[in-house]
C-alpha cells in the first residue's frame, strides 16, 4: 500500500469518525445517537486496521458494535421517557461544556504536535497468536483479573437490574 | 506537520478530538445512557492512542495491544453495570435524566 493511498484512507476514516462522534453527542433523538455509534465504532476499527492491529479490529467490531451498542439500545428501549422528543437533550451547562471540550482539544493537540517521540521504523508483527501467548504467559495476572472483573460485573448487573424481591 | 506520510501525530490529533467530543457528551447530556455513550467515545480515543504508540514507538512489544484488550474488557463491564444502574434509577425515579435525580441536593 503506497503512502498516498494510506493517507487518503486515513483522512476518510478519521472524517467519518469525527463526524459520527459529533452526531452521537449532538443528536436530539437518543435512538439516532445510538445508531450514530455504529459508523463511529466501525471507523475506530478501520483505524486499528490501518495501524496493523487486525486482531483488535475484529475484537472492536465484536465487542463494541456487537455487544455494547446493542446493550445501549436495549436500555434506551426499556427507559421509555427518552423517546419523547420535546424534552431537551442537553442540560444548561451545554455552553460551558463546549468551552471545556474545546480547551481539552486545544491543550492536547498543542502538546501532541510539539513533542517529538522516539519513533522506530520496525515492522509490526500482527498476529493473534503472539497476543494469545502474551496473555497466557507474560500478562497472565491482568488477564485473570479481567476475567474476575467480568464475572463480578455480570453478577452485579443482574443483582442491580432485577426488580424488587417480593 | 502536513506531510504525505501517515505519522503518529495524525492518530494522536484524531484521538484528542474524539476525546474532546466525548468530554462534551459527558458534560452536556441530560440522559444517563447518552452520558455513557460519551464515556465510550473517550475510551475509544484512549485505545487509538495506545495502538498508535504501539505501532510507531515500540512495535516489537505487545503491551499496547494487551492494554487495549483489557480496556475493551473493562469498558464492557462498565457498560453492563452502568446500564443496570440506569434501569434501577429509571424504576425508582421514573426518569433516566441525570439532572432530575437530585435527592441528595441541599
Image (tube, rainbow, N blue to C red):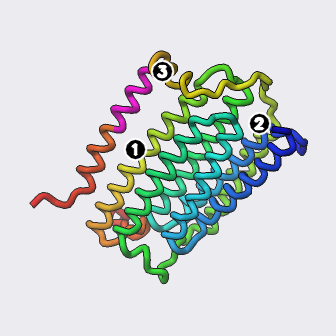
Residue range of the region highlighted in magenta in the rendering: A139-150
- Observer-nearest residue: A95 or B64? B64
Indicate left or right for A80 with A100 as reference.
Answer: left
User: Residue at the left extreme?
Assistant: A166
SS state under label 1: helix
Taking the spot 81% from the left edge, 31% from the top edge, the residue there is A116
Q: Quadrant of residue B97?
A: bottom left
Query: Magenta stretch: residue A147 in it?
Result: yes
Q: Which mark is residue B8?
A: 2
Taking the spot 54% from the left edge, 66% from the top edge, the residue there is A33
What chain does mark 1 sit on? B
* Quadrant housing the N terminus of chain B: top right
Q: Which mark is residue A139?
A: 3
SS state under label 3: loop
The residue labelled by disc 1 is: B77
SS state under label 2: helix
Amino acid at each position: 500500500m503506497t503512502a498516498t493511498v494510506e493517507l487518503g484512507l486515513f483522512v476518510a476514516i478519521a472524517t467519518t469518525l469525527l463526524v459520527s462522534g459529533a452526531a452521537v453527542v449532538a443528536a436530539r433523538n437518543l435512538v439516532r445517537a445510538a445508531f450514530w455509534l455504529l459508523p463511529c465504532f466501525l471507523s475506530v476499527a478501520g483505524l486499528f486496521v490501518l495501524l496493523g492491529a487486525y486482531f483488535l479490529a475484529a475484537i472492536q467490531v465484536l465487542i463494541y458494535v456487537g455487544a455494547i451498542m446493542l446493550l445501549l439500545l436495549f436500555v434506551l428501549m426499556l427507559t421509555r421517557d427518552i423517546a419523547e422528543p420535546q424534552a431537551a437533550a442537553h442540560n444548561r451547562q451545554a455552553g460551558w461544556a463546549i468551552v471545556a471540550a474545546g480547551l481539552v482539544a486545544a491543550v492536547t493537540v498543542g502538546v501532541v504536535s510539539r513533542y517529538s517521540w522516539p519513533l522506530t521504523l520496525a515492522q509490526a508483527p500482527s498476529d493473534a497468536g503472539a497476543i494469545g501467548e502474551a496473555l497466557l504467559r507474560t500478562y497472565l495476572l491482568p488477564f485473570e483479573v479481567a476475567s474476575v472483573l467480568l464475572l463480578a460485573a455480570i453478577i452485579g448487573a443482574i443483582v442491580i437490574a432485577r426488580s424488587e424481591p417480593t | 506537520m502536513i506531510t504525505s506520510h501517515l505519522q503518529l501525530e495524525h492518530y494522536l490529533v484524531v484521538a484528542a478530538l474524539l476525546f474532546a467530543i466525548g468530554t462534551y457528551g459527558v458534560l452536556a447530556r441530560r440522559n444517563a445512557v447518552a452520558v455513557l455513550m460519551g464515556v465510550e467515545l473517550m475510551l475509544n480515543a484512549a485505545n487509538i492512542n495506545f495502538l498508535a504508540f504501539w505501532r510507531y514507538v515500540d512495535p516489537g512489544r505487545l503491551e499496547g495491544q494487551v492494554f487495549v484488550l483489557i480496556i475493551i474488557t473493562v469498558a464492557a463491564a462498565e457498560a453492563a453495570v452502568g446500564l443496570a444502574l440506569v434501569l434501577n434509577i429509571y424504576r425508582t425515579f421514573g426518569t433516566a435524566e441525570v439532572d432530575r435525580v437530585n435527592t441528595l441536593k441541599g
